[in-house]
């Protein structure tokens, strides 16, 4: 029997991509899942489709409109979940955005936008869910970072900063939570074929060229990614690195940070080719 059966989970950013696939996989395994996303109609449609598929026989899905940058709203979602479903076993802090562009081209609003969602969105989820889990004496917080939380990538500094911070806070919380019964994991995927690249703001770079570059990176589907995430969660892996290329990059970063930096400089050349005003 699945460890997720009859467990209660919240997944943020569940309207699309990785979050949607994780929510679907959890429901298939018998969990009760609250799907949270700031795109209300989209997330409602996703939850309805899941319930139609499972017919309530395995897990169940319910949708809430939630902007993870709003701390009070995140806290309310967590509290409402515990009040109605009786417990909180998993908090997937997954919602995220990206802004592409060199630091000389982006501005302070771009930094704030990325850090507000990717870092403060995760902090809000942690701050709301962790005390509940400590009280319960069990629970697992799963924060979506990225391979960009482990290795520096050019042309996306705010995103890299946010994801490094998410890895750092997850590792710290993993140590603090261990004796309190709370598990913590950071998910670090490489290229997953989702809408994030189409939806991202791009500053002074040619979107078409960037999308062509991205298409050349070997990637996997969100469903394959969700399977790897849940496998990592089951094993209570601290840093769940996903895709073969991301695993190689992470190994290279640990073996020789200089070499990893040189490799990423090649990426910088490709980014510069996509720059509009040279
Ligand atoms: N796709 C990749 O290659 C990749 C790789 C590494 C990490 N990630 C991370 O995975 C996570 C999911 O990304 P994805 O690729 O599935 O992208 P996606 O764009 O398909 O999904 C992101 C979801 O988050 C939601 N969202 C955005 N801002 C929000 C907010 N303020 N409040 C609530 N919901 C919000 C969006 O509406 C969307 O449904 C992100 O944290 C992303 O950084 C993605």
Image (cartoon, rainbow, N blue to C red):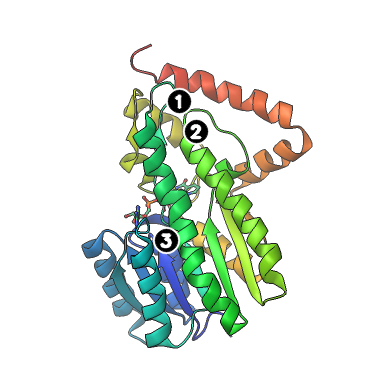
Q: How many marks?
A: 3
Element under disc 1: loop
Q: Which residue is mark 2?
A: 157
Q: Is residue 187 above or below residue 111?
A: below
Question: Which numbered tag is attached to residue 103?
Answer: 1
Side of 19 relative to 65 (left or right): right
Furthest toward the left, the residue is: 41
The answer to whether residue 137 of the structure is visible from this angle is: yes
Q: Nearer the viewer, mark 3 or mark 2?
A: 2
- Report the quarter where the C terminus lies: top left
Find residue 246 and report its horizontal and vertical position in percent.
61, 43
Q: Classify 10 Å Cα crowding around label 1: few (below 14), some (14-19), many (20 and above).
A: some
User: Residue placed at 33% from the left, 66% from the top?
Assistant: 73
Q: Is mark 3 within 8 Å of ligand 1?
A: yes
Question: Which numbered tag is attached to residue 129?
Answer: none
Q: CA distance from mark 1 to mark 2?
A: 7 Å
User: Residue placed at 35% from the left, 66% from the top?
Assistant: 72
Tell which circle, 3 or 2, labels the residue nearer the N-terminal end.
3
């Amino acid at each position: 029997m699945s460890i997720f059966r009859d467990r209660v989970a919240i997944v943020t950013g569940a309207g699309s991509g990785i979050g949607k696939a994780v929510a679907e996989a959890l429901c298939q395994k018998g969990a009760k899942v609250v799907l949270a996303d700031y795109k209300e109609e989209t997330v409602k449609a996703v939850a309805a489709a899941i319930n139609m598929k499972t017919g309530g026989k395995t897990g169940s899905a319910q949708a809430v409109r939630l902007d993870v940058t709003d701390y009070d709203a995140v806290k309310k979602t967590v509290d409402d979940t515990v009040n109605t479903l009786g417990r909180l076993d998993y908090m997937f802090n997954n919602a995220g955005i990206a802004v592409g562009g060199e630091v000389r081209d982006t501005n302070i609003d771009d930094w704030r936008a990325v850090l507000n969602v990717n870092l403060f969105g995760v902090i809000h989820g942690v701050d709301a869910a962790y005390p509940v889990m400590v009280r319960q004496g069990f629970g697992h917080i799963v924060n979506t970072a990225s391979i960009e939380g482990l290795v520096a990538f050019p042309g996306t500094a705010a995103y890299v900063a946010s994801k490094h911070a998410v890895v750092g806070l997850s590792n710290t919380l993993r140590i603090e939570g261990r004796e309190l019964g709370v598990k913590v994991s950071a998910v670090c995927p490489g290229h997953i074929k989702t809408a994030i690249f189409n939806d991202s703001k791009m500053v002074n770079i040619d979107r078409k060229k960037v999308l062509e570059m991205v298409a050349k990176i070997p990637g996997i589907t969100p469903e394959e990614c969700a399977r790897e995430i849940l496998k990592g969660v089951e094993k209570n892996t601290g840093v769940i690195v996903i895709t073969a290329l991301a695993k190689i990059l992470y190994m290279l970063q640990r073996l020789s940070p200089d070499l990893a930096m040189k490799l990423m400089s090649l990426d910088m050349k490709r980014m510069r080719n996509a720059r509009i005003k040279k």
